[in-house]
Amino acid sequence: MNKARSFLAAAAAFWLAPAPAAADQASVLDATVTANGDGSYSFSATVRHGDTGWKHYADKFEVLGPDGKVLGTRVLYHPHVDEQPFTRSLGRVQIPIGVTEVTIRAHDKVHGDGKRTFKLKLPPRR
């Protein structure tokens, strides 16, 4: 009877133990936009992702138009394991006339496009 109890206790401990932490989808926590004098826009995005190294990290963020078309991309060339969340910028993005709002979306090497995005209203062109 003792062996059976020990086995059940061990099995319960195994199945009820929390799973090891894993990197989830890349999320955009915040973003800003500035109109430039040449008619383009500059963006700054704060991204969070549980980067684990070169095989799994947030590798870019994108500026999307209302139709989902990618208007600009900031490539992130290395993992940010010890810098979370992190903020990066993208300048000189040309936005079509008539577009008044964009979405910022992050991407990681394993999960692809993140679901937590950030919408920004564009300031008037200079």
Image (cartoon, helix red, strand yellow):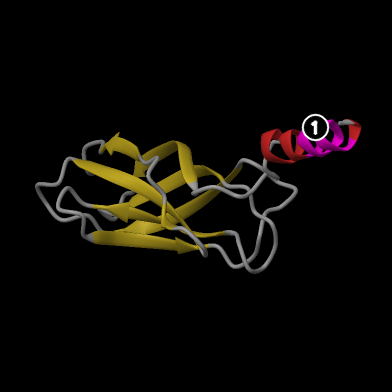
Q: Which residue is mark 1?
A: 9
Q: Residues within 10 Å of mark 1 (few under 14, many from 20)?
A: few
Give the left or right position of residue 51, taking residue 36 as reference: right
Give the left or right position of residue 68, taking residue 112 as reference: left
Q: Residue at x 71, y 52 (%)?
A: 81
Front residue of 30/123: it is 30
Residue, far right: 2
Q: Residue at x 36, y 46 (%)?
A: 104
Q: Amino acid at mark 1?
A: Ala
Give the left or right position of residue 106, taking residue 86 as reference: left
- Assign the N terminus to one quadrant of the image: top right
Over which residues does the magenta segment extend? 3-10
Residue 38, image x, y percentages: 29, 55
Against 10, residue 79 (above or below) is: below
Q: Residue at x 66, y 42 (%)?
A: 84
Q: Residue at x 74, y 40 (%)?
A: 11
